[in-house]
Amino acid sequence: CNDKVYDGSASATCTISLATPKSGDNVSASGTCTFADKNAGNGKTVTCTGITLSGTNAGNYSLSAASASKTSAASITKRLITIKANDQTITYGSSITTGTAQVTISSGTLATNDALVGITLTQSTTNYTTNGSITPSAATIKDSNGTGNAMTTYYTISYDTGVLKIDKASLTP
């Protein structure tokens, strides 16, 4: 079976080999293959069931009951994403706006049914600047299909800073 990148599903892609059909015969096997679970990990069990034969010579063969399912192993690797802080302009004495709406996923994508539900944003300074930075960190990703399970461990996350501009505050004499 083929390794895959975490995608939030347990589906697997496998090539099901047949033991020595007659030379020149056109016969192949297919079935539904799934990992034991959808989570990232190495050497995970993959089971293929409902195996059927196809091809012009498939009618000359049958599958034994023991051959109707197969078990193999493959890995689900962590999904790579980059989270970038949005640029912000504030006035001296104010705070940056925080929350997941203040970042974008600039590289990669979240898996289906996963959602970014938390992020820490840290500003480089609280003083007047035209070229400060906002640094994202500590992202929290959860399964949004109703279970709310933490999925952050199935991602390798890089972070890119955003630009922070702090305007001078106006004083009235």
Image (tube, rainbow, N blue to C red):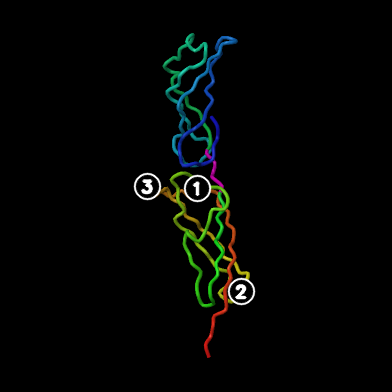
Residue drawn at x 45%, y 51% as measured from the top left = 115
Relative to 57, 50 lies left or right:
left
What amino acid does circle 1 point to?
Leu
Tell me whether circle 3 and circle 2 mark residues in contact (CB < 8 Å). no
Give the class, few, some or many, for how many residues have Cα within 10 Å of label 1's Cα (few <14, many ≥20).
some
Label 3: how many residues lie within 10 Å, few (<14), some (14-19) or many (20+)? Answer: few
Cα gap from disc 3 to disc 2, whole angstroms? 43 Å
**Residue at image location 44% in from the left, 23% down from the top:** 69
The span from disc 3 to disc 1 (Cα, nearest Å) is: 16 Å
- Residue identified by numbered label 2: 129
Mark closest to the chain's N terminus, 1 or 2: 1
Residue at label 1?
Answer: 110
Residue 83 falls inside the magenta stretch: no
Q: Residue 81: horizontal and vertical position, in percent?
A: 55, 50
Q: Position of residue 16 (x, y in %)?
A: 52, 23
Residue stretch rendered in magenta on the structure: 76-80
Q: Judge from the rendering whether residue 1 lies leftward or rightward of residue 51; answer left or right.
A: right
Q: Amino acid at mark 2?
A: Thr
Q: Is residue 16 above or below residue 168?
A: above
| Residue 8 x/y as whole percent | 46, 42
Please, what secondary structure does the residue beneath circle 1 have? loop
Q: Secondary structure at mark 2?
A: strand
Task: Single out the residue that lies furthest toward the left.
Answer: 146
Q: Which residue is mark 3?
A: 147
- Identify residue type, mark 3: Thr
Which residue is more in the foreground, 11 or 154?
A: 11
What's the magenta bit mostly, secondary-structure-wise?
A: strand
Q: Residue at x 47, y 53 (%)?
A: 116
Tell which circle, 3 or 2, labels the residue nearer the N-terminal end: 2
